Image (tube, grey):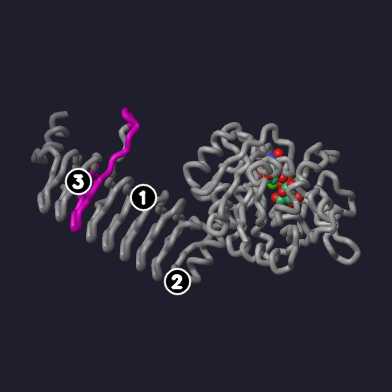
Amino acid sequence: MDIKAVILAAGKGTRMKSETTPKVLHEIMGKTLLGYVMDNVKNFVSEQFVIVGHHAEAVEKFVQNNYENSKTVLQSPQLGTGHAVSMVCPSLENFDGLVLILCGDTPLVREETLKAFVEYHKSSNSDLTVMSTIFDNPTNYGRIIREDDNSLKCIVEEKDATTEQKAVKEVNAGIYCLNWAKFKSSFGQLQSNNAQGEYYLTDIISWGKAQGLSVNAYILDNSDEIYGINSRLNLAEATKMMNRRNLERYMVEGVTIVDPDSTWISEDTEIGQDTIIYPATYIEGKNKIGKNCKIGPCAHLRGGVEVCDNVKVGNFVEVKKAKISSNTNVGHLSYIGDAELGENVNIGAGTITANYNPLTKTKSKTVIGDNVKIGSNSVLVAPVELQEGANVGAGGVITKTVPAWALAITRSPLKVLENWVKRQTSEK
Ligand code: UD1
Ligand code: CA
């Protein structure tokens, strides 16, 4: 059965207290909250609709630049989660499959979880399935209210809940799967007579029950996955949860993480066996690291980095959009950006690929062949190429191609003035 996703991303995110960035474009280790949600569904839905409103242009641009088979739909003004979903009704008028509804502020839910959820929906012959979980501290989430026979009754928001309802620990994850044709007319019939004066998506449950449709809740065991981000505190907490999960995965796969408490590695990084990640290393965005590498301590990989096998990226080394081929060392205090490094290269301490021209605001590439050796404290002014086997003397400032097996040296000749210091002191 065809599945389409609707992702709610129009809300202001008031509690984030941000003037410049809509909530769903805040980042966890180099990837936006919305990016996590869209990546998790892109492999099993035919189309994604992202509801945009607050800072719509920025969110539209993000979706258009990064995702195929996706459309943005404007919700203005933003009158609640139910109103948000109603915005896709014209686009889905004749659709007769499943719609998976998700919130753009819940980045920890995993693809496997969503697939299992959809499978449950299908196998239980449900018309609407809501994902729920149990939280020790359910504050701020909608509470799942059940009938005497334990079947789903309704969802009550924190602000509308009675004291008794507030004590309920089963909460709404904000993830729904529904048979679209049966529910599409519900969205025009929602009411806003609640504490927030909003059209709540959660009210489609009562609507469905009144129509005699089958409405169920799917309880997710791992409650961490539905942690929603409403504030900067939540963002920091979610980043920690995501990181811990990633590090556990790497360790299980045979990567040594010397100090999980000070190491940060993004979900979209692949790491080969027997690689060692030393403390205080921060790896964000999409990267691929080979086998038997040593990374850090205090290394920073900023995304778009490919590190082959047996590579050393040492202390205080920053790497961005670069390929480092096997058996190459970038040992200390270097910046490697927009660069391609061959095999068996040695980059001396303090080497910089000067990739950015602040006058033209353009970036250029540095290409380094196999077996190149760069002396310490060198600046490679891009665009520039160092061909196979070339050497650069320490302190080199390289502005044009260095041919294969040549030595480039740019320092002024060393002068040694014998007894100069003694002469200075004896004259006084
Ligand atoms: C919502 C649910 C709550 C659930 C929680 C899970 C409702 C009424 N409440 O509450 O039951 O426990 O999520 O995290 O659905 N949005 C729009 N347009 C709007 C309003 C919101 O697109 O007009 C988007 C937001 O950008 C956000 C999502 O919908 O991505 C959820 O909105 P939010 O205000 O965060 O809802 P919660 O109060 O967290
Ligand atoms: Ca929320």
- Residue 420 image offset from top left, x and y in percent: 12, 36
**Is residue 20 depicted above or below 67 in this figure?**
above
Residue at the disc numbered 1? 319
Q: Is residue 364 left or right of residue 11?
A: left
Residue at mark 1 to residue at mark 2: CA–CA distance? 23 Å
Check disc 2 and give the amino acid type.
Gly
**Is residue 425 depicted above or below 27 in this figure?**
above
Residue at the disc numbered 3? 385
Residue at the disc numbered 2? 254
Is ligand 1 less than 8 Å from the beta carbon at label 3? no
In terms of sequence position, does the residue under pointer 3 or pointer 1 come before the other? 1
Q: Is residue 347 left or right of residue 3?
A: left
Check disc 3 and give the amino acid type.
Glu
Check disc 1 and give the amino acid type.
Val
Residue at mark 3 to residue at mark 2: CA–CA distance? 36 Å
For mark 2, does the 10 Å Cα neighbourhood hold few (<14), some (14 to 19), or many (20 or more) residues? some
Kindly state the secondary structure of the residue where label 3 is placed.
strand
Residue placed at 63% from the left, 34% from the top?
A: 54
Residue placed at 63% from the left, 47% from the top?
A: 7
